[in-house]
């Protein structure tokens, strides 16, 4: 089945550095979303990028989408300790409202 | 708005018992999703509803699992009988489709941590 695979699985950086996470998927999509999950909490939506968009910004977040490579990246600039969380990409199954979530990247930002 | 509400937050039960998880979506949202999250399998979509009607239940693992949405403000996920391998965190999420029929973000509840002994 279609699934997003995040890379790396885990990432540890110092506060102030940039964090980049990648997501690859298997089939055509209408859009791709990124979510954050703090330990013991539900997922929180960060940003949505549509298949006809190549780049999108939201505050310190920058998302790119390359549909030819079936991949997306999430960049968090000037990271903070509060950014410590797991990050997931979610891709839609064309023609439905069904989303498949990736395996996630565990980000740890050291103060 | 209080967001998506799930109850209970934690549930510990013994194998063979019936378990009922509850969800109240955000008012006005027309899509409701049930997910299960485990370390081994990640986040899996179990079933989703549109305007209280189940659209896709292909993710429901077995007949022991059933879900209902009797009205726009309430949904249940039932496991009967429960087994230890059902131990997981179960999330409910809701969403509102745009007028253009495009996709919107999903709002997740805090989850129910289920432990089956």
Image (spheres, coloured by chain):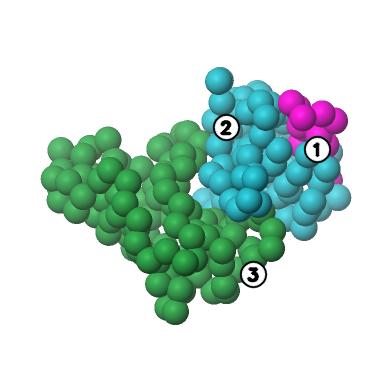
The relative height of residue B76 versus residue B103 in the rendered view (above or below) is: above
What is the number of callouts on the image? 3
Q: Dot 2, how many residues are within 10 Å of its Cα: few (below 14), some (14-19), or many (20+)?
A: many
Residue at horizontal 49%, vertical 40%?
A43
Assign a secondary structure to mark 2. loop
Res. B76 image quadrant: top right
Label 1 – label 3 distance at C-alpha:
26 Å
Q: Chain of mark 1?
A: B
Please determine if labels 2 and 1 lie on a single subunit.
Answer: yes
Is residue A89 visible from the viewing direction of this image? no
Q: Is residue B59 left or right of residue B99?
A: right
The relative height of residue A9 versus residue B87 in the rendered view (above or below) is: below
Res. B33 image quadrant: top right
Residue at horizontal 73%, vertical 55%?
B59
The residue beneath circle 1 is: B52
Q: Which mark is residue B109?
A: 2
What is the drawing colour of chain B? cyan
The relative height of residue B63 versus residue B74 in the rendered view (above or below) is: below
Residue interval drawn in magenta = B64-77
* Quarter of the image that includes the N terminus of chain A: bottom right
Label 2 – label 1 distance at C-alpha:
18 Å
Name the main secondary structure of what is drawn in magenta.
strand
Res. A59 image quadrant: top left
* Quarter of the image that includes the C terminus of chain A: top left
Q: Which mark is residue A1?
A: 3
Please determine if labels 3 and 2 lie on a single subunit.
Answer: no
Assign a secondary structure to mark 3. loop
Q: Chain of mark 2?
A: B
Label 3 – label 2 distance at C-alpha:
25 Å
Residue at horizontal 77%, vertical 54%?
B56
Q: Is residue A47 left or right of residue B51?
A: left
């Amino acid at each position: 089945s279609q699934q997003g695979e995040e890379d790396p699985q885990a990432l540890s950086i110092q506060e102030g550095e940039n964090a980049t996470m990648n997501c690859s998927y298997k089939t055509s999509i209408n859009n791709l979303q990124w979510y954050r999950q703090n330990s013991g909490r539900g997922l929180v939506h960060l940003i949505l990028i549509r298949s006809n968009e190549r780049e999108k910004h939201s505050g310190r977040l920058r998302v790119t989408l390359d549909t030819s490579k079936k991949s997306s990246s999430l960049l968090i600039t000037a990271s903070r300790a509060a950014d410590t969380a797991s990050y997931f990409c979610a891709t839609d199954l064309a023609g439905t409202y069904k989303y498949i979530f990736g395996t996630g990247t565990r980000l740890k930002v050291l103060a | 708005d209080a967001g998506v509400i799930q109850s209970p937050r934690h549930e510990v039960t013994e194998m063979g018992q019936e378990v009922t998880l509850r969800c109240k979506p955000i008012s006005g949202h027309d899509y409701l999703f049930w997910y299960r999250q485990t370390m081994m399998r990640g986040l899996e979509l179990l079933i989703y509803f549109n305007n209280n009607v189940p659209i896709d239940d292909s993710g429901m693992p077995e007949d022991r699992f059933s879900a209902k949405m009797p009205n726009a403000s309430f949904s249940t996920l039932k496991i009967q009988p429960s087994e230890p391998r059902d131990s997981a965190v179960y999330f409910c999420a809701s969403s509102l489709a745009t007028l253009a029929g495009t996709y919107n973000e999903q709002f997740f509840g805090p989850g129910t941590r289920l432990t089956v002994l």
